[in-house]
Amino acid sequence: MAKDVVMPALGMAQETGTLLRWFKAAGDSVSKGEPLMEVETDKAAVEIEAPASGTLSNVTAQVGDVIPVGQRIALIIAPGESGSTSSLPSKPELIPSSQSEPRPVSVSATPVAARLAADHNLDLTKIKTNGGQIRKEDVLAYLDSQKKPRQAVRVLASPKARRLAEERDLDIRSITGSGPEGAVLANDILAIHADEGKGVMGEGEVSRIWRVMVDRLSQAWTTIPHFYLMREVNASRLIAWREKVKNISEEKITYTDLLVRLTAAALRKYPRLNASWQNDTILLNPEINIGLAVAVEDGLLVPVIQHADEMNLTQLASRRSEVIARAKAGKLSLEDLSGGTFTISNLGMYGVDAFNAIVNPPQAAILAVSRIADRVVAVNGQPAVQPMMTLSLSCDHRVVDGARGAEFLQALADLIEEPLQLLD
């Protein structure tokens, strides 16, 4: 039986994804689990595996298309099955990759025509066609009638070269390619980049990941009503706990691992902090999947530890080590980025005393963790030097009010100061 290939979702709030490249062409044999395509969402670019074995057929999406989540873009047919599209519905309208204003539903255009129209800021409803979808020829004819210059012929270039050129704000049409028929290859882009800055991004350049991060954080900052709760906690028992377990665990145990374990326990007790704001309502998430904010060379990624409340410390440390390594290598998978319900951002290793983080939508809260530092505090009414740590909880006021946030933070602080409560 034929298997649909659809645009996957990497997050609960994701609506579209951009097709970056196909690893297979129509008619190629594919095996279940092998890389089939690479897509980019508002989180990252990831490789998507084939959902079944068979022959790739009925490919309707092209590189650069911005596609609604869940939309079918190809089929994988089993031996003996027909690849005919006669029984398939007509291709749904794709969103122009330039992310221009969406055209009316009644107007249908091929992806090439849509991108060409968007590049010239054209209203598709004003473009005449002989019937059916608006095609590239129709757009070019309209440009001629308006005495606007035609778009240059599409330059031959590999998908990776196009991505690199876009990331570096380079006009790929001005680059001499070294590939077949003058195609621009990734090495051609990298050679220019090395000549200009010896591999270092110049002033004003931003990567694709950085642009995605800017878009997401700008949207979160301007649409989410944030409020912040801060709490200073004594980390003496946390330090002692780590010293004890790191000598008996096969995995390297970090403070982040301990905090994920404690945070998951606190979220079980206060599920409202594990909820989401979606479709103007509060959705209580059945799973506790904790994301870890990870700084990479080009920006910020948030790989996820799924079912964190069901793991022991060794399992948490192993999963944390794996996803952070993949994040830094640019090899995060679909699973690595999916389903986060709460996020921890730990800057303690950078010597930060305190900071506030921006909520990662559609999650309800994010925990900012600072360094552990010796401070003079009162112990039994007397001044004493103790290792202290500041926690800052950023909350979405649409989901969490001050009292609920404070109760969660109190529970987490109690667990940090007395981890043995986990045994209760």
Image (spheres, grey):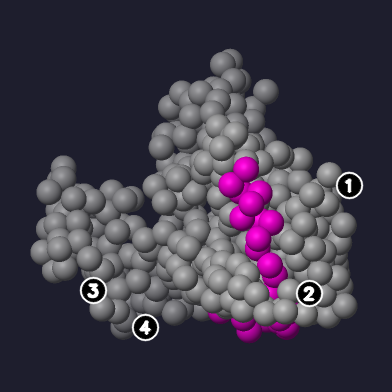
Q: Give the numbered dot on residue 146.
A: 4
236 over 355 or under it: above or below: above
Secondary structure under the numbered disc 3 in the rendered image: loop
Q: Which residue is mark 1?
A: 424
Proximity of marks 1 and 4: CB atoms separated by less than 8 Å: no
Whole-Å distance between the Cαs marked 3 and 1? 55 Å
Amino acid on which the number 4 mark rests in the picture: Gln
Whole-Å distance between the Cαs marked 1 and 2? 26 Å
| Nearest to N terminus: mark 3 or mark 2 | 3
Is 319 on the left or on the right of 154, as rendered?
A: right
Q: Which residue is mark 3?
A: 202
Judge the density around disc 3: few (<14), some (14-19), many (≥20) Cα neighbours within 10 Å. Answer: few
Amino acid on which the number 1 mark rests in the picture: Asp
Q: Which residues are magenta?
A: 217-244
| Nearest to N terminus: mark 4 or mark 3 | 4
Q: Which residue is mark 2?
A: 380
